[in-house]
Image (spheres, rainbow, N blue to C red):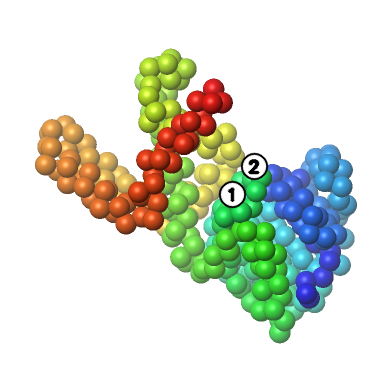
Amino acid sequence: MMLGNKLTIIGGSGGMGKVFGQYFKKHGFEVVLHARNQNNLKIVAKQLGVDYETNLENAIKDSDIIMISIPIKSTPEMIKKVAPMMKKNALLFDITSLKFEVYKLLKESCLKYPINCLSLHPMFGPGIKNPKNYVIIALRVGGTSIYENLVDDFLKIFRKDGFIVTETTPELHDKIMALTLGVPHMLNILFLNLLYRSNQPLNDLTRYTGTTFLLQKVFAESIIQREMEMFGDIQMENKEFHHVLKRFLKLVKEYTKIITRKDKKKFIKLFQQGLDYSIKDLHFNESYDYFYKFMKILKNNS
């Protein structure tokens, strides 16, 4: 492999920084962490058994691979800082949830400097235990004459561990993320806020509920415990999500008319559209079984 051995993680004391610090150390890389909060940085480096560096330039100047794992809004500025400091043929990659602006800056960087750029989006959070069948989205950006071989070697590490590496474009990535991240986040945030406005304590509601509510509550509570700023950025900064939101508002108005007018024909039509769409899904026939498997896990742990 031509990857080299030294790997620096900028934002190494955060949740995903820790996950990948541990992951790359396991794969034999000499991992160096860099972060703004020096106290957290030292603690995490000690936990993982890796080095840390408080000076940004010192952290990356000799590194073969640099990973940026910081908030979405801060990533573009960090790319601008890091790219000129990197050594020739080094690989720079980010793990942000939005790609359009980041991809553009990475493209400019690898055209301006003799470096290689890649953009990844891990479709999992810090709680991951087993990599098998978890998705990592990859966007090839470009770089030096060794680019394709370098990136192939790098992505091969993930594939060997069972990750599903899906390659795409920045435009398609952000459009898909509006639907697969933005929509579930929005619906679950609204679900909890709708219950909040009922003035009924959640514990009281749970005493009266069946399977559907309980599972929905678990999904919503798992989302609401994570980073608010990141969820806000995923929806606010993604132009594609704004289009989705307009369609959602139109659908809610349509649904309101159907319910208030007790229009069963239109209700059945709307219900049938959802059924026709989902029946083509590969998991459709097993979805009810999955539902009760989840419920069994919840009941056993309650």
Residue 49 seen in the current view:
yes
**Quadrant location, the N terminus:** bottom right
- Which residue corresponds to the image point at 49% horizontal and 62% vertical from the top-left? 173
Identify the image quadrant of residue 63.
Answer: bottom right
Type of amino acid under label 2:
Gly
- Identify residue for label 1: 124
**Figure label count:** 2
Report whether 277 appears left or right of 222. left
- Residue 138: x %, y % from top left: 58, 65
- Kindly check if marks 1 and 2 are in contact, taking CB atoms under 8 A apart as contact: yes
- Residue 228: x %, y % from top left: 56, 39
Callout 1: 10 Å neighbours few (<14), some, many (20+)? few
Identify the image quadrant of residue 243.
Answer: bottom left
Q: Nearer the viewer, residue 90 or 281?
A: 281
Q: CA distance from mark 1 to mark 2?
A: 8 Å
- Which residue corresponds to the image point at 54% horizontal and 26% vertical from the top-left? 300
Q: Nearer the viewer, residue 253 or 217?
A: 217
- Residue 50: x %, y % from top left: 86, 51
- Identify residue for label 2: 127
- Which residue corresponds to the image point at 43% horizontal and 41% vertical from the top-left? 290
